[in-house]
Every structure is written in C-alpha cells, then in structure tokens.
Amino acid sequence: MSEGALMRLEREITGCRLCPRLVQWREEVAAVKRAAFADEEYWGRPVPAFGDSRAGLVVVGLAPAAHGGNRTGRMFTGDRSGDWLWAALWKAGLANQPVSRDRGDGLEVSGVWVTAVVRCAPPGNRPTTEERDTCVRYLARELEVLEDARAFLALGGFAYEALCRLTRTRPRPSFSHGAQVRLADGRWVVCSYHPSQQNTFTGRLTREMLDDAVGAAVALANEA
C-alpha cells in the first residue's frame, strides 16, 4: 500500500507547477546549465524523494541544489552536500555505496528515506515562506504514508521548523546541532547542521559531527 501511494505522490510532485518563481528558475538553470555539465540533460523538474518505503529513519533537507538534484533528478545527488550525506549514511549501514552521482549509479538504500521540505531548486537556496507553505503539503503526505518512520534527521533549521509545524510540536525547542527532540506525535527528530559548503568549508560541520548525528537518529529509529 505505501509503495503505491508513494509512487502516485511522486508523479504528482514531478508534475507540480504551483510556484511560478521556482518553475522559472529550475527551468532556466536546466536550459543554461553549468559549464562542467554542458553535455548533460538536466532534470529541471521538482525532485521526488528517494529511499526505502519501509524506512524507520527519514532524512529531511531544505531543497534540491540547482546543479545537484535539479540536474540529476535525485535528492542529494551530484553535489557536495550529497557527498557528505551519503558517506555518512553508508558508514551507518543504510546505503550500499558512499556516493550518489546520478540516478543510474546503482545506489541502493535500506531503512532510510531521503526527502526535502521544498522540491524545486530555489534561487540562492532560499525559498520564500509562501513557497515553503505551498510545497510542504508533499512532505506531510509522505509522512502519513511512511508508517514505519520512527525518527527524523533534520538537516538545518528550515527542515527542523517544518517538522515541528507538521507535527504541531509546541513549544518548539531551539535548533542546535545534535539536539534530540521528542515531537508531539511521539517520534524523534535529531538536528544537524546542513552539509552545505558554507558549513563544511568553514568547519562548522565536520564529518564526525554528521556521523554522530546520523548515528543518533538511527539509534532512535531502531528503538522498539
């Protein structure tokens, strides 16, 4: 049942054109392209989630990168943020390889679902409040279908806030890296700084910090 519902949701997501600014930007990026990927065909559409429909852990990011997910058509694939995330998920035993380059690279996962609050690449990696509120409906529906999900890994404050809003968690504890918060629906969220270049290049987020956050989320997902 969950797989069928998720497939229907995926079709709806990839055909979405509700946010004019995001539609214009994602398609412009796909047409102009980055020089390094000039010979590639960009996805240029909303990016669906990826993973195991029976996952106990759900990883939630902000949005696809313009030349990452918007190019490859898979979350956290083809960019440096994805390099960090998949290395950590592989180390935790949730992925069969530590890299995710494109949709045909043989990546397989078990026990994890990777998604985002916003499904189109936003200019400057900054969706508006209206775009967030329009797109978060898809995350809400995913969480309804993912019946085995017991824990979340929120990559950044944007994802953490969205999860708290969706689960009606009030008051919302402050976001901090490594924080573990019990949501109003009884599930857990572990907070992590987003593995963006802004955080990884400056050392605000190290690989050990991300590994620890993933490990904590996995442990909570596996609790009886």
Image (cartoon, grey):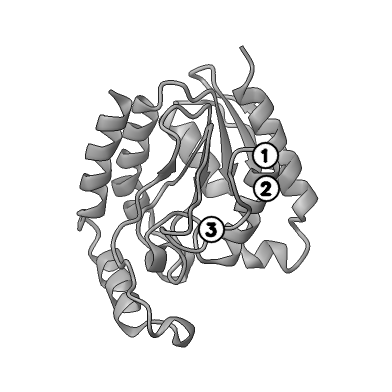
Within-10-Å neighbours for mark 2: few <14, some 14–19, many 20+:
many
User: Residue 41 at x, y = what percent?
Assistant: 32, 75
Residue indicated by mark 2: 88
Q: Residue at x 40, y 64 (%)?
A: 72
Residue indicated by mark 3: 100
**Amino acid at the residue labelled 2:** Ala
User: Residue 15 at x, y = what percent?
Assistant: 20, 54
User: Residue 130 at x, y = what percent?
Assistant: 32, 53
**Mark positioned earlier in the residue sequence (2 or 3):** 2
**Mark positioned earlier in the residue sequence (3 or 1):** 3
Identify which residue, 138 or 134, lies in the foreground: 138
> Quarter of the image holding residue 223?
top right
User: Residue 49 at x, y = what percent?
Assistant: 39, 46
| Residue 127 appears anywhere in the view | yes
In the rendered view, does 6 fall on the left or right side of 222?
Answer: left
* Residue at far bottom of view: 35
In the rendered view, does 217 fall on the left or right side of 49?
Answer: right
Question: Compared with residue 205, is residue 41 higher up or lower down, i.e. above or below?
Answer: below
Q: Provide the secondary structure element on which disc 3 rests.
A: loop
In the rendered view, does 208 fall on the left or right side of 182?
Answer: right
Real-space CA distance between mark 3 and mark 1, rounded to the nearest whole angstrom? 17 Å
Residue indicated by mark 1: 214
Within-10-Å neighbours for mark 1: few <14, some 14–19, many 20+:
many
**Amino acid at the residue labelled 1:** Val
**Amino acid at the residue labelled 3:** Ser
Question: Which quadrant does the C terminus fall into?
Answer: top right
| Residue 126 appears anywhere in the view | no
Q: Residue at x 52, y 48 (%)?
A: 158
Q: Provide the secondary structure element on which disc 1 rests.
A: helix
Question: Compared with residue 197, is residue 86 higher up or lower down, i.e. above or below?
Answer: above
Q: Residue at x 63, y 28 (%)?
A: 181
